[in-house]
Image (cartoon, rainbow, N blue to C red):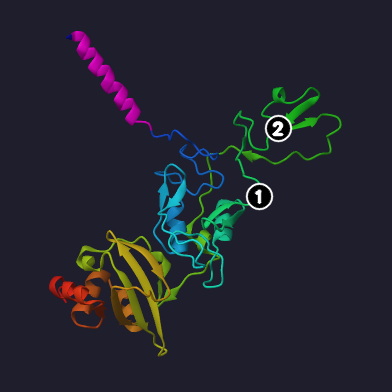
Amino acid sequence: MRFLAIVLIAAMLLATLASASVIPTKLTEQKCGNGLREGYELCEKGTAFDICPAIGKLLKIAMVCHEDTCACLPNTKDCGNQIREGTEMCDPGKKEAPIDFCPNISTAIGFPLKCDTTTCDCVPEGKTIIISYCGDKKVEGDEDCESDDDCPKGRSCMNCTCLREEQDLNLTPVQHNVTTDAIPIPTVEQITSKAGKTTIAQFVIEDYVGEVIPEELDYFDDEAINIHVSLKDGTNTTVSLITTEMVVQEIHHYALNDTSINIRISEDTVVGIKAADNRTQTIVHLLADGTITYKPTGFFRRIWFWLFTPF
């Protein structure tokens, strides 16, 4: 009986250790899973080194980090149709502009990227970059050495480059990366600075990607919505958004062809909402009194809204 108990306890301990592992079994060249965003990784899940939300605001779609690849998800794409959509970072063509955000993301992470036209992802331009940190006692990347022992006879290690003491005195060693805990994290403003922002009635629409829909407006969840805004100058503009799981997933500055709801609002009303102390309650009241009008598309959608919305 005692032997059986010992076996069971050992099995439980092994199972606990296996489930506690947080390091993926297969790491990328950039050491995905080590808690640091390196090379052309876009994120390290669960750490401050995650710029997927910021890149999501650039692409106008909510994005999260994939812990096994250190890339950004979801992978909703229609690559090759010359329209950048979903999580595509590029889709070269003439139907839409801008269609290639790889230069912006290159600026954000400090490595040259180009568009892969088969996947619509940004990939390293030229030779694959392997990050190296001079001083970490590991010879990697374009380093020659970490100490004099790593160099051939007659050469010494200077800034991780092997140099002859006599003949190479006038040569400048390669400037390798220096190990530091202060790894810069690009901000949303830095990533989106070259892409521009869309401002309508004092609202920057990119800022609302990833916002949670308040419970009072949960009937606008899982929808494709066109918002038509009457501007003060007599013109009209349209903003579209897609909501899923109580989160604003995508926002665009054009009308969707396949939409479930059309909302109409004036620029003055939008400005009033922005200035309100409680924006959610203000929107609820404006929907109730007809200042903001909405019309579901399709017979069954109209019936559903008639039965389940308070307006």
Give the answer, above or below, for where 239 lies relative to 112.
below
In the picture of the structure, the residue carrying the numbered disc 2 is 144
**Residue range of the region highlighted in magenta in the rendering:** 2-21
Crowding near the residue tagged with mark 1, few <14, some 14–19, many ≥20 C-alpha atoms within 10 Å: few
Q: Is residue 31 left or right of residue 243?
A: right
What secondary structure is the magenta-colored segment mainly? helix
| Of residues 270 and 249, the one drawn nearer to the viewer in this rendering | 249
Of badges 1 and 2, the one in the foreground is: 1
Q: Is residue 43 magenta?
A: no
For badge 1, the amino acid type reads Gly
Q: Is residue 189 left or right of residue 282?
A: right
Q: SS at mark 2? A: loop
In the picture, residue 257 is in which quadrant? Answer: bottom left
Q: What residue occupies the far left of the structure in this picture?
A: 307
Q: Residue at x 70, y 22 (%)?
A: 149
Crowding near the residue tagged with mark 2, few <14, some 14–19, many ≥20 C-alpha atoms within 10 Å: some
Q: Can residue 278 be seen by looking at this rendering?
A: no
Give the answer, above or below, for where 126 lies relative to 305.
above
| Of residues 182 and 140, the one drawn nearer to the viewer in this rendering | 140
The reply to whether dot 1 and dot 2 touch (C-beta < 8 Å) is no
Q: Residue at x 34, y 28 (%)?
A: 18
| Of residues 138 and 67, the one drawn nearer to the viewer in this rendering | 67
Name the image quarter holding the N terminus: top left
Instruction: Tell me the tag on residue 126.
Output: 1
